[in-house]
Image (tube, coloured by chain):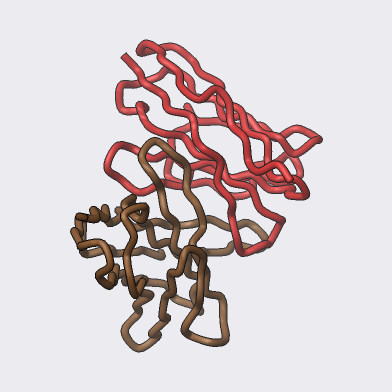
Chain colours: A red, B brown
C-alpha cells in the first residue's frame, strides 16, 4: 500500500520564477492538503482540495494556487517566487471528512 | 480560531529516562488532537490521535498521550526513551468547516537523547 508521494524532493529556483510541486495521495484517499513548513517552524496550512475544487484555504496570497486531478493527485503552484517562500512543502492526504491526514516526505524548495 | 502551544522548544533526556512533551490547545468545540514526529529532512509521521472516548490514548513506538479538557492539554509521554526517538515532535489540532478540514500545528519540540 503506497503512502503519500511527492516530487521533486528538492528544488532550487530564483526570485520571480514559478514552481510546480506534485503530490500523489495514499491509496484510497480522495482529499489532498498542502502545508508550508519554514525552517524551525511548524507546518502552516495552505489549502485543501477535494473533487478537484479548493475547499478551504489558509492565510496565503493568491500567488499560491493548486489543482487536483481526476485521479486525486494534486499540484501546488507558486508564482513570482520570493526568498521567503523557501521552505519544506508537505502534502497530506485523507478521506473527505476524515479526521486523520497522512503526510508525504515533502519537497524542499530553496529560492535564491 | 484554533491554536496550539508547545512551551518547550528543546528538551534533552537521557536514554532510558521518561519523557513528557507538553501541548496546550485553544479550540471552541471538542478538539481532534494529534501528535506527529518528524526526523531531520523528513515528512511527518502520525504517532497518535484523540477524537473522543478514553482520554488516555496509545500510539506507535510506545508513546501515549492524555487529553485533559480542564487544562486544555494533550501531553505526550513515553516511559523509557530510546536514542532513536531523537526528532522534532509536533502537536496539532484539527478543525472542520463542513467536510473540509485543516490542521493547526504548534511550533514543535526538538528532543535530544543523550547516551
The quarter of the displayed image where residue A2 is located: top right
State the image coordinates of residue A90 (x, y, percent, origin top left).
Answer: 50, 39
Quadrant holding the N terminus of chain B: bottom left
| Residue B16 versus residue A95 in the image, above or below | below
The residue drawn where x is 35% and y is 49% is A42
How many marks the image carries: the answer is 0
| Residue B11 versus residue A76 in the image, above or below | below
State the image coordinates of residue A46 (x, y, percent, origin top left).
Answer: 49, 42
Front-lying residue, A68 or B86: B86
Judged left or right of residue B108, residue B96 is: right
| Residue B14 versus residue A5 in the image, above or below | below
The residue drawn where x is 50% and y is 52% is B45
The residue drawn where x is 51% and y is 65% is B60
The quarter of the displayed image where residue B6 is located: bottom left
The residue drawn where x is 35% and y is 26% is A86
State the image coordinates of residue A44 (x, y, percent, origin top left).
Answer: 41, 46
Judged left or right of residue A69, residue A75 is: left
Quadrant holding the C terminus of chain B: bottom left
Judged left or right of residue B101, residue A112 is: left
State the image coordinates of residue B53 (x, y, percent, origin top left).
Answer: 57, 86
| Residue A75 versus residue B65 in the image, above or below | above
Front-lying residue, B34 or A45: B34
Judged left or right of residue B1, residue B97 is: right
Amino acid at each position: 500500500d503506497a503512502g503519500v508521494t511527492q516530487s521533486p524532493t528538492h528544488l532550487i529556483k530564483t526570485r520571480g520564477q514559478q514552481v510546480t510541486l506534485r503530490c500523489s495521495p495514499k491509496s484510497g484517499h480522495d482529499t489532498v492538503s498542502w502545508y508550508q513548513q519554514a525552517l524551525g517552524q511548524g507546518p502552516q496550512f495552505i489549502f485543501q482540495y477535494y473533487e478537484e475544487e479548493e475547499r478551504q484555504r489558509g492565510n496565503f496570497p493568491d500567488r499560491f494556487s493548486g489543482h487536483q486531478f481526476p485521479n486525486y493527485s494534486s499540484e501546488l503552484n507558486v508564482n513570482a517566487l520570493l526568498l521567503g517562500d523557501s521552505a519544506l512543502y508537505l502534502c497530506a492526504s485523507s478521506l473527505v471528512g476524515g479526521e486523520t491526514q497522512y503526510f508525504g516526505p515533502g519537497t524542499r524548495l530553496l529560492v535564491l | 480560531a484554533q491554536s496550539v502551544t508547545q512551551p518547550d522548544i528543546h528538551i534533552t533526556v537521557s536514554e532510558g529516562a521518561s519523557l513528557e512533551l507538553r501541548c496546550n490547545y485553544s479550540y471552541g468545540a471538542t478538539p481532534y488532537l494529534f501528535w506527529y514526529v518528524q526526523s531531520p529532512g523528513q515528512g511527518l509521521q502520525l504517532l497518535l490521535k484523540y477524537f473522543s472516548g478514553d482520554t488516555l490514548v496509545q500510539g506507535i513506538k510506545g508513546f501515549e498521550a492524555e487529553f485533559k479538557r480542564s487544562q486544555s492539554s494533550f501531553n505526550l509521554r513515553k516511559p523509557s526513551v530510546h536514542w532513536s526517538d531523537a526528532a522534532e515532535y509536533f502537536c496539532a489540532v484539527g478543525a472542520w468547516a463542513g467536510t473540509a478540514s485543516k490542521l493547526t500545528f504548534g511550533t514543535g519540540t526538538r528532543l535530544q537523547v543523550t547516551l
